[in-house]
Image (cartoon, rainbow, N blue to C red):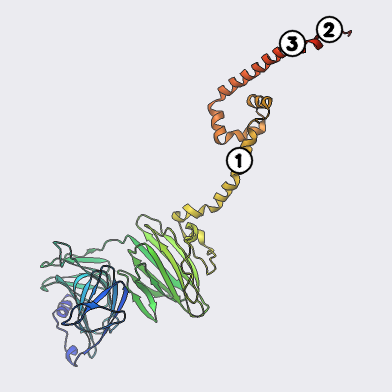
């Protein structure tokens, strides 16, 4: 493999590549977002347009707010992140081989390469510090513009293998899946090391239909017209048992849209799982009704380190209505049908994050219903302000049915913290009553004096 990769880099392609003249093939530019520039040979940069056909010698540059995709004649794709510049050095078809060569001067590109048909086929990316030579793989190339590291090149592989050589071709390493290497200008490739673990991974599984998942930055992934589409760097797409599975690392916050395509009036199940570092996975499941046009849409909102709020909002023919108010935690961890009805497995699809808000919805209702009863009971247990004698009696000898009400709220704290004071106050009230009664008896003296004078 090493010898073959080195030969490919130096342009030794074998006899079959020169058996017949090469035929140049155009590439198609797709603008995902923002402003993209193109420069044709011997010309200046000018605004590019979505759908432009590009030829050998053309250079594409993305601005700070833009992303674009180059689709090569043989099906391979190159996604350009912001502030990236890449030139098409060759894009040609031979008798039984294909040649695709790029020079990347700056920025970050994500390559998804179709399986090369013969050993004579080539797909190379050259940078100021290195050359990456691939054979049926998915990988990204980053060229630094940081002071002191200008031109430093990092190659990270997702699928397959990438032979990475220094600028002189004297040193080479093979970068396998989930590994990365860095080449400094004038230096040799570093030993491959594990690629950094993604901060967040979003996985979407769609059963019952083909699907395209568009991430918050507008990059699409999935199956379209029977072909795999993989535009998010580091993403993977697989199809097995009628289920399309899309996995996307390091997605930012924003809206994730899944568009399903299938037979009219069919139903597809879309399951979205978000896994972040130090957080429990959060899952949303939606039953998407495919309208008469053969498509339907559902969306999920990604927020924070995990999927805290989500709105599974299926849409029919027009795709409108795909955005609804975010569901609560429990609801967001499960799907909603087109009518907004939660799926039957809502409460089991999500974990602690979802339970914090809506997992206790019923309990919260029960507590709310109980509060008036508690307040009423507490109010009944308090002495009435209309009858002072009744107040004295309740203070000194509370009835049995008032005791439970005294065990809640502020009454409980008052009863437990000041029992002696209450008893003392009760005794004082009783003694005061006796004194008042004694003083009041002389006013009743005339009737009292007549009583002893009567015969018994």
Badge nearest the viewer, 1 or 2: 2
Residue 345 visible at all? yes
Q: Report, in whole angstroms, how far the alpha carbon at label 1 lies from the one at label 3.
A: 48 Å
Residue nearest the viewer, comparing 49 with 333: 49
Q: Secondary structure at mark 1?
A: helix
Q: Which mark is nearer the camera, 3 or 2?
A: 3
Badge 2 crowding class, 10 Å Cα cut-off, few under 14, some 14 to 19, many 20 or more, is: few
Q: Nearer the viewer, mark 1 or mark 3?
A: 3
Q: Position of residue 237 (x, y in %)?
A: 36, 73
Residue 148 picture quarter: bottom left
Mark closest to the chain's N terminus, 3 or 2: 3
Q: Residue at x 15, y 63 (%)?
A: 149
Q: How far, Cα to Cα, is label 1 from label 2?
A: 56 Å
Q: Which mark is residue 442?
A: 3
Q: Which residue is mark 1?
A: 374
Which residue position is annotated with label 2? 452
- Residue in the image at 62% along x and 42% along y: 373
Is 201 or 41 nearer to us in this picture?
A: 41
Position of residue 301 in the picture relative to residue 154 (left or right): right
The answer to whether marks 3 and 2 mark residues whose Cβ atoms lie closer than 8 Å is no
Label 1 vs 2, first from the N-terminus = 1
- Residue 445, compared with residue 175, is above or below; it is above
In which quadrant of the rendered image does the N terminus lie?
Answer: bottom left
Q: Relative to 439, does residue 146 appear above or below in the rendering?
A: below
| Among the 4 quarters of the image, the one containing residue 241 | bottom left
Q: CA distance from mark 3 to mark 2?
A: 16 Å
**Total numbered badges shown on the rendered structure:** 3
């Amino acid at each position: 493999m090493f010898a073959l990769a080195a030969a490919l880099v130096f342009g030794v392609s074998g006899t079959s590549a020169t058996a017949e003249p090469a035929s140049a093939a155009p590439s198609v530019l797709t603008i995902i977002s923002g402003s993209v520039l193109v420069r044709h040979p011997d010309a200046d940069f000018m605004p590019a347009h979505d759908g432009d056909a590009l030829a050998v010698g053309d250079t594409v540059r993305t601005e700070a707010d833009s992303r674009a995709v180059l689709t090569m004649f043989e099906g391979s794709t190159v996604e350009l992140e912001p502030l990236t510049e890449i030139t098409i050095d060759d894009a040609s078809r031979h008798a039984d081989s294909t040649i695709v060569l790029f020079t990347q001067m700056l920025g970050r590109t994500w390559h998804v390469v179709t399986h090369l048909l013969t050993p004579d086929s080539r797909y190379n990316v050259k940078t100021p510090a290195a050359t990456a030579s691939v054979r049926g793989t998915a990988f990204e190339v980053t060229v630094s513009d940081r002071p002191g590291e200008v031109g430093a090149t990092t190659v990270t592989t997702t699928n397959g293998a990438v032979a990475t050589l220094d600028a002189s071709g004297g040193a080479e390493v093979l970068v396998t899946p989930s590994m990365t290497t860095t080449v400094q200008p004038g230096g040799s490739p570093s030993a491959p090391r594990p690629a950094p673990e993604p901060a967040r991974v979003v996985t979407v599984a769609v059963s019952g239909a083909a699907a395209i998942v568009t991430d918050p930055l507008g990059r699409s992934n999935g199956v379209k017209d029977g072909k795999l589409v993989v535009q998010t760097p580091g993403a993977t797409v697989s199809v097995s048992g009628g289920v399309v599975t899309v996995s996307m690392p390091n997605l930012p916050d924003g809206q994730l849209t899944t568009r399903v395509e299938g037979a009219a009036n069919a139903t597809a199940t879309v399951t979205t799982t978000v896994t972040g570092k130090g957080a429990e996975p959060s899952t949303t499941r939606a039953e998407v009704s495919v309208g008469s046009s053969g498509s339907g849409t559902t969306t999920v909102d990604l927020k924070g380190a995990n999927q805290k709020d989500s709105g599974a909002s299926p849409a029919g023919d027009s795709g409108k209505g795909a955005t609804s108010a975010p569901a609560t935690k429990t609801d967001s961890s499960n799907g909603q049908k087109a009518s907004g009805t939660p799926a039957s497995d809502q409460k089991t699809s999500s974990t602690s994050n979802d339970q914090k808000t809506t997992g206790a919805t019923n309990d919260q209702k029960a507590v709310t219903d109980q509060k008036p009863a508690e307040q009423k009971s507490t109010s009944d247990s308090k002495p009435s302000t209309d009858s002072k004698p009744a107040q004295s009696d309740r203070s000194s000898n509370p009835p049995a049915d008032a005791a439970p009400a005294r065990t809640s709220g502020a009454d409980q704290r008052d009863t437990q913290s000041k029992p002696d004071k209450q008893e003392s106050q009760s005794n004082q009230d009783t003694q005061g009553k006796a004194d008042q009664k004694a003083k009041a008896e002389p006013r009743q003296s005339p009737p009292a004096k007549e009583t002893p004078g009567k015969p018994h």
